Image (cartoon, coloured by chain):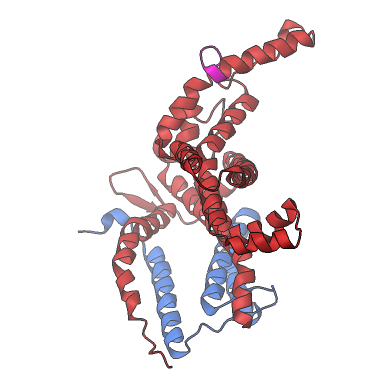
Chain colours: A red, B blue
Amino acid sequence: MTKTYNNKAWFLVLPVLFLVAMNAVIPLMTVVNYSLQETFGDNLFFWAGTANYEAVLSSERFHTALLRQFIFTFTILAIEIPLGVAIALAMPKSGPWASVCLVLMALPLLIPWNVVGAMWNIFSLPDIGLLGWSLNSLAGAISSLLNLPPDQALTFNYTNQIGSAWFVVILMDVWHWTSLVVLLAYAGLRSIDDAYYRAAKIDGASRWAVFRYIQLPKMRQVLIIAVLLRFIDSFIVYTEPFVLTGGGPGNATTFLSIDLVKSALGEFNLGYAAAMSVIYFLISLFVCWLFYTLMTQSDAKREYEQ
Amino acid sequence: MGLEWMAWTPQTGIFFASIAGLLVVFTLWEIARPGGHPRIGILGLLTTRGDRLFMSLLAGAFIHLGWLAFATGPLWIASIIALGLAVIIFLVV
């Protein structure tokens, strides 16, 4: 049987293409235009060439914000992906408890980002927040157990300690977004045919072998999506750390996006901020391409060789 | 609707026009030779024509940024390096 070659259905994508052009491509082009110019408002622009890019690339502030961004992103990926898979494996496969688990898991995803930030802000306050108060009591108990002098006693205060601030920011992100990985991994697990498990049972496969050779390969596709989504979302994270710590103490949790908004709206340095946006965009584009290519190559090659 | 708010300059206009031109050329190329010419190159990656264009453009962007960050001298040298790398990518990657 010969199939007629007809790709006209692609024209149905045109409306989406138009929408994306309006809200992504055209603003991006504008940002590129801004990045090569200097403005003092009033739609008056002065050609600045590559001066803005040179300023960003040689700025110590940009380097440290970028480093913090990468540390944050890779820390939460290293926690959320394994944790999410582990929770998905532990969840019941069917029955009413499966629904209860799914609803509980979905709850954090339904909360607006600024509310998440405000919640954790109050929750972690060192004197009145439940988490902050508990951690402080625990730190006090440990300090007296170790007989530490009062000036070296352990305390928890995310408003002036760098380590505490990072701890809360990462804990907040894990609380908010691990569910997404769980739901994706759970969907992947549910789609595995029972025949695979029966075959594994007949072969006497261990629990680890079942995970390594059946469940993990079958979850590949959804885990690719989970890693990409979590990478991008955490790389552009703004609202939650901004509400929680405001980038502080000092600049300790000023991630790229917070720094970018400071330059653009706080200092009204539009050319500089635009150049920073372009660099920011190129970095995330490169990392996404890298992840996607590495994770889809083996499937694509198999298809190619057939 | 005017386009003043987009703050166009001749330079960025030429830049985006060349990108658009590249997309048109590659579309025509695809119509003339469908399938995208997939192959496994020296990096061990399976790439099509479009992948190679994307890699060339992205590498070009980072070469220019790297030049601004680490080198002194006119920027067109970076453009020549990027163009050379693009040729290499299209030949062997």
Q: What is the quadrant of the N terminus of chain A in the image?
A: bottom left
Residue at the image position 59 percent from the left and 78 percent from the top: A303
Residue B7 lies, in percent from the top left, at 33, 56
With A58 as the anchor, is A267 left or right in this view?
left
**The C terminus of chain A is located in which quarter?**
bottom right
Place of residue A99 in the rendered image (x, y in percent of width and height, measured from the top left): 46, 42
For the record, the magenta segment spans: A126-131
Q: Could you tell me if residue A267 is visible in this image?
A: no
Question: Residue at horizontal 61%, vertical 71%?
Answer: A299
- Name the residue located 57 percent from the left edge and 69 percent from the top edge: B55
Q: Position of residue A81 (x, y in %)?
A: 61, 47
Q: Nearer the viewer, residue A85 or A204?
A: A204
> Residue A96 versus residue A239: which sits nearer the camera?
A96
Give the number of marks: 0
Left or right of residue A52, residue A10 in this image: left
A276, above or below A299, in the image: above
The answer to whether residue A94 is left or right of residue B13 is right
Residue A200 falls inside the magenta stretch: no
Quadrant of residue A293 within the rendered picture: bottom right
Q: Is residue B68 in view?
A: yes
Q: Is residue A129 magenta?
A: yes
Q: Compared to B8, does A75 lie above or below?
A: above
Tell me where residue A137 appears, x and y as whole percent: 64, 12
- Above or below: residue A97 compared with residue A293: above
The picture quadrant where one finds residue A18 is bottom left
Q: Residue furthest left?
A: B1
